Image (tube, helix red, strand yellow):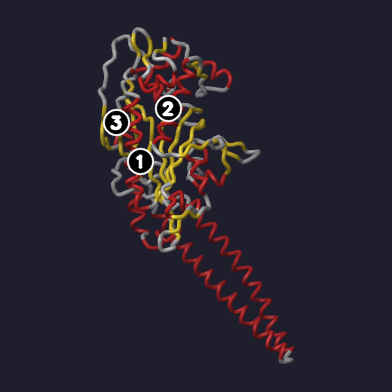
Amino acid sequence: MLQLQLIRTQADSIAQRLKIKNFDAQEIVQKLQEVDAGRRAVQKKLDDTLAESNTLAKQIGELFKSGKQQEAGVLREKTTQLKQSSKELQDELASLEKEQENLLVLLPNLPHPSVPAGKTSEDNEIVSQEGDIMEMGQDAVPHWELTGKYDIIDFELGTKITGAGFPVYKGKGAKLQRALISFFLDQAIEAGYTEYQPPLMVNEASAFATGQLPDKDGQMYHTPLDNLYLIPTAEVPVTNFYRDVILREDQLPLKSTAYSACFRREAGSYGKDVRGLNRLHQFDKVEIVQVTHPDNSYDTLEQMREYVCGILRKLELPYRVARLCGGDLSFASAMTYDMEVYSAAQKRWLEVSSISNFETFQTNRMKLRFKDKDGKTVLAHTLNGSALALPRIVAALLENNQTPEGIRIPEALVPYTGFDLIN
């Protein structure tokens, strides 16, 4: 959530910057300014009314001491009227504050100045590319055919017991999943991240704090009876560890990692690009989260980007890094890098990780602050990234490593799988 002070001092700039995200903020910003002016006026009236009540209370006490009961009674009648006015002003103030918050949550985060203009993923800026794009033989097939051939993932069984987008992993397919999770977690721990195992459901306050609500309300699985949400990523519970917390500056950065199942409705996703493992309703992912000092967050973003690239190198997958254009940025992100691996059989790039800097957008919602060296309370910055999401990694590993003998396992994974070939 944007800070209200920005609306007061940089309204025109905010509207201009949000155009990069293809978001017309002019009407909301103008309404916010009007509501804020009204709220401050009511707050002043309330403060003045309460101050007058306090002054009269002292005068009434002195009049009673002096035996001037009649004069004191007149003033008491006036304080009764002031109390009623105070109650009305407090109700009006609460209503304006609620209206103000309802407007603020409609505004996306401001894009970083380096974010390129654009409307779709076609306009993203390719920052780097590494690894050879291999040409597969005529016998090469996409992963959804390989999974059946080697009996490692059963899509039909998943559809039978739950629905489309909920595959069942079996045999070496299940072990490959477990191996990747362990490998990713070990890599994160080695890089200084503390491992957590968070809940798979969160309450409304947690989903709001990280920006899923109200923006992605329709994309989350919701259990109405308990008003809980299945998490779309471990980012949500892990970042909320620090909700309503004031840290010390010397505690920063906080580096956390967690494996979780992830749940996404993915409403409106159809077509060949969602076939097989390309887009699922339930999938596994290892997430990395950092809480940093504002001065360091963009250096941290680059470090996290390079960290994920390092994992992809170890998996021997050709990859590229894209800086997302404004139209492709998420609601809460100020800047995002996508890491994409090349799927040789599908002959296209598959996004396997997003690394994002949210600056103060999440921390303002969750009141996550730290005390700086001068004792001032400052909002921290939050970042998170997939390190990594499994489905498309598995898809690329299966497709890129298919041989006449079977599917080759990258050397870095063999200690985790216990086998070097799926056949």
Mark 2 crowd level (few <14, some 14–19, many ≥20, 10 Å Cα): some
Task: Name the residue rendered at 37%, 20% in the picture.
Answer: 397
Horizontal arrangement in the rendering, residue 29 relative to residue 320 (left or right): right
- Give the residue type that dot 3 points to: Arg
Task: Give the mark nearer the N terminus: 3 vs 1.
Answer: 3
Q: Give the x, y percent position of residue 274.
A: 42, 24
The quadrant in which the C terminus is found is: top left
Mark 1 crowd level (few <14, some 14–19, many ≥20, 10 Å Cα): many
Tell me the distance, in whole angstroms, between the alpha carbons under discs 1 and 2: 24 Å
Query: Closer to us: mark 1 or mark 2?
Result: 2
Query: Closer to us: mark 2 or mark 3?
Result: 2
The circle on residue 336 is 1
Horizontal arrangement in the rendering, residue 175 relative to residue 421 (left or right): right
- Give the residue type that dot 2 points to: Phe
- Give the residue type that dot 1 points to: Thr
Above-or-below relation of 291 to 54: above
Q: Give the x, y percent position of residue 64.
A: 72, 87
Is the C-beta separation of discs 1 and 2 under 8 Å? no
The circle on residue 183 is 2
Task: Give the mark nearer the N terminus: 1 vs 2.
Answer: 2
Q: Mark 3 = which residue?
A: 320
Residue 118, by quadrant, is: top left
Tell me the distance, in whole angstroms, between the alpha carbons under discs 2 and 3: 21 Å
Task: Give the mark nearer the N terminus: 2 vs 3.
Answer: 2
Horizontal arrangement in the rendering, residue 365 relative to residue 226 (left or right): left
Q: Is residue 264 visible?
A: no
Residue at the top extreme of this rendering: 404
Residue 376, by quadrant, is: bottom left
Task: Name the residue rendered at 44%, 14% in the picture.
Answer: 147
Mark 3 crowd level (few <14, some 14–19, many ≥20, 10 Å Cα): many
Q: For the residue labelled by badge 2, is the local secondary structure a helix, a strand or a loop?
A: helix
